[in-house]
Amino acid sequence: MRDIGRVEQVKKFTLLKGPFTQEKGEITPMLKIKRKVVQKNYSDLIEMMYRE
């Protein structure tokens, strides 16, 4: 295992209640994440991770 810098380390993360779904438009039929949709749907959680 290589040493990683402090800047590269994960400091905070949030678990979601459920998986990303096609019904909510969060993933494509090829199961790729639609980042803009996810960012819009979970903007409050993303903001909370950067505040604390």
Image (cartoon, rainbow, N blue to C red):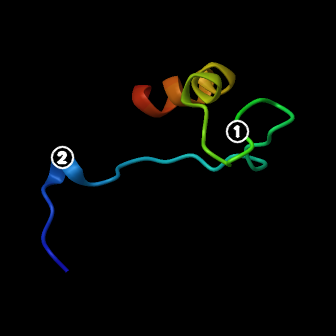
Image height of 41 relative to 3, above or below:
above
Q: Position of residue 32 (x, y in %)?
A: 61, 44
The residue at the point 35 percent across, 49 percent down is 11
Q: Nearer the viewer, residue 9 or 51?
A: 9
Image height of 25 relative to 8, above or below:
above
Q: Is residue 52 visible?
A: no
Residue 11 located left or right of residue 15 = left
The residue at the point 71 percent across, 34 percent down is 26
Q: Nearer the viewer, residue 5 or 31?
A: 31
The residue at the point 67 percent across, 48 percent down is 31
The residue most toward the bottom is 1
Label 1, label 2: how far apart the Cα atoms are? 31 Å
Q: Do residues under tags 1 and 2 come within 8 Å of each other at their CB atoms?
A: no
Q: Quadrant of the C terminus?
A: top left
Crowd tier of the residue under label 1, counting other residues whose Cα lies within 10 Å: few below 14, some 14–19, many 20 or above: few
Image height of 51 relative to 20, above or below:
above
Q: Nearer the viewer, residue 16 or 21?
A: 21
Q: Which mark is residue 28?
A: 1
Q: Position of residue 22 (x, y in %)?
A: 80, 38
Residue 13 located left or right of residue 33 = left
Name the residue that disc number 2 marks.
Answer: 7
Badge 2 element: helix
Q: Position of residue 24 (x, y in %)?
A: 82, 31
**Does label 1 or label 2 sit earlier along the sequence?**
2
Q: Quadrant of the N terminus?
A: bottom left
Image height of 46 relative to 27, above or below:
above
Q: Which corner quadrant of the image does residue 9 belong to?
A: bottom left
The three-letter code of the residue at mark 1 reads Thr
